[in-house]
Image (cartoon, rainbow, N blue to C red):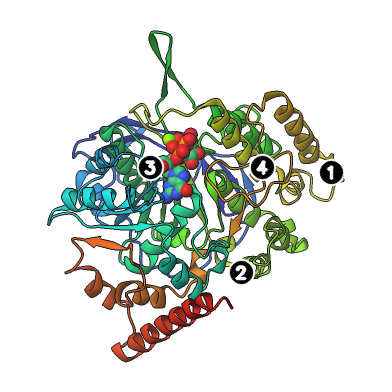
Amino acid sequence: MRVSRPRESLTVGNLSIMHEIKVMELDGGEAAGVHAAPALGPWRPFPSIPAWPSFLSRTPDPSTLEKAKETADTSAVSISHAVLDKILAQMVIIVPCMDESPEIIEGVLSGIPHSCLIIIVSNSTRKPSNDGYQAEVEMLRNFCGSRRQALAVHQKDPGVAAAIKATGMPELIGADGTIRKGKGEGMILGLILAAALCPERKYVGFVDADNQVPGAVHEYCRTYASGFALYPSSEDQHIMVRLRWASKPKARGDTIVFEPEGRSSHIVNNWLNQVLSPIADTATSDRVVVTGNAGEHAMTMCLALKLMLAGGYAIEPFHFIDLLSRQLPSLSAVPSSASSVASYNSDADAASTSSSRASDNSLEASHVRILQIRTRNPHIHRPSDDSHISAMWKVGLGTIYYHSRELSSLEDLVQPGEPRDGGITTMCEKMLEFVDEHDSSQTSRDPAADGAHEKEPLPAPRIYPPIERLDLAALGDALEHGGVADSLKQFGLEAGWASSRALERPPVGAGLARVGTAVARFLYLRLRAFLGL
Ligand code: GDD
Ligand code: MG
C-alpha cells in the first residue's frame, strides 16, 4: 500500500492528532519505504517518555518516519507486502452485527484478510422460531471451514455477562443480567474477548457488519496495517488508526451522488474542531478532526486496554474526549475529571468507574498518536433514516457537551493563568441552539444503546472503565474451560488458542486455581440470581 506521508499534527502534551493521510495506491509494490514491522512487545505499558516535551505543538510532526528508509517520492510512503502481512497476522477484526442477513455478513468476512482473526459480536434477535444468531454461527462455520480462525459470541449471553461481572467489570451489565444493548457495548465485548482469549494478537480493528462492499472491507483492514507500519519505533505503542471513507454514496432521484462526508460525521467533526480551535492553527483548524465518528477504526491492544470507552454510538467520538482530557494540565488541579466522568453514569457503578480512571496513569505519561486515513473505496451500507442520523450526531455532541468542563482547560494552554473567556461554555450554548434548529429525531436517546442517560437536550454517554481493569487471565480461563458461555463458538482455533495463551500463563497450578475461582464465582452468582438475592 502507498499512503501520503504524514506531515502535520496537532500535538497536545503527549497526544498527536495527525492531519489527514491519504491512501495513494491500494498496492504500493515492493519498492517500499517501510521494511520493518513495528516492534511491539506484549501489553506492558511502555516506559514513560518525559511529560510535556513541548506541551502544545502545531508544527510538522518531527518524529515521522525519519528512521524509515526514504523512497524517491518524499510525499508518500510505500509499505511492503511483507510488512503488511506481518501486522495483519497479529490483528483481530471485530464485527459488531445486529440483524443483518448472514449473506451480507459473509460478504464482510470475505473482505477481511485471511490471517486476521475474526470476532463476530452479535446482538441479533434470538427466538425459538427465528434464531438470528444460530443462522450467523452456521454461516460462520461454513465460511471458516478448516482454514479460518474466528470466534462468535452473542451480546445477550448471560454466562458471558456473569463471567465479565465476576472478573471485574460489572458496569457493562444491565438490569437483566446481560451485557447492555448498544453498538459500543458490543465492541467492548469484542475487545474483552480479544484481550482475554487472543493475547498474542497485538492489534484490534472494527468493521461494521452491514458493509455491502467486500473490497472496501479489504482496503480498511490493509489501511489499518499501513497506519501501524508508519510508526515502527517501539516507542509508538499507543496508536489509533481512524478511517475517513472516500465518499458516502447517496441516491438522489435517478443519480448517485458521492458525498464526501456522512451527515452525522459532518456535524460531529465540525464541533470537535471547534473544541480544538483555541489551540489549532487558524489555517487548518476546520480540518484537524476528520474522523470524529469513525466506526471503522483500529488500535494497538496496548492502547485499547487503557482507554475509557463509551457505550452506543458515543464510542468513537469519545476516544477524542478521553485522550484529550488525559493531556490537559487542569486534570491534576481538577481531579474531577474522573468524578465528572463518573457523574454521567448516574447509577451505582459510577464510583468504581471513577476510581479506575484515577488509578490509570500510563496513558497520560506515554505518547499516543491518532492517525486519520482517507480510503479509496466509497462506503455503502444499510441506509439510515433522518431520525437515526439526528440521534447519532446528538450522541456525538453529547460527548462534548457533558465534558465541557474538562475541555474548557484547553484555553489554559494558550493563555495560561489568564481569566478564561468562556469559549467552551459559549460554544456549548451555541451547540444547544444548533440542536434546537436541526434536530429531527424528537429524542435524545442513543438509537443503539440502553439509554439510561437521557439528560435533555442531548444524550449523555455511558462511560465504561478501561478493559485492563478485568482479570483477563481468569476471564479467559472461565470462558475457554469453564463452560460458562453457551453462545461462544470458536472455529479454527483448537490447535492454536490454548497453546498460544499458555505462553503467557503462569504455571498450570495457578491457572487451575484461577479457573476454579472464576467458575465458583460464576456458579455462586447464578445461584444468587436464581434465589432472587
Ligand atoms: N453487537 C451489536 N450490538 N452490534 C450492533 C448494535 C448492538 O447493539 N447496534 C448496531 N450494531 C451493528 C449494526 O448491526 C451494524 O453492523 C454496525 O453495528 C453499525 O451500526 P449501524 O446502525 O449500521 O450504524 P450507522 O451505519 O448508522 O453508523 C456507522 O457509521 C458511523 C459513522 O458514519 C457506525 O459505525 C457508527 O458507529 C459510526 O459513527
Ligand atoms: Mg450502517
Residue hosting label 3:
99
- Of residue 14 and residue 305, the one placed in the foreground of this image is 305
Q: In percent of the image, x 67 and y 24: which residue is there?
A: 438
CA–CA distance in space, label 2 to label 3: 34 Å
Task: Tell me the kind of residue under disc 4.
Answer: Gly
Can you give x and y, in whole percent of width and height, for residue 210 in the image? 36, 37
Q: Is mark 2 within 8 Å of ligand 1?
A: no
Residue hosting label 4:
398
| Quadrant of the frame with the C terminus | bottom right
Numbered badge on residue 420? 1
Task: Tell me the kind of residue under disc 2.
Answer: Ser
- Of residue 318 and residue 189, the one placed in the foreground of this image is 189
Residue hosting label 2:
356
Q: Which picture quadrant has residue 41?
A: bottom left
Task: Tell me the kind of residue under disc 3.
Answer: Asp
Looking at the image, the residue that sits furthest to the bottom is: 509
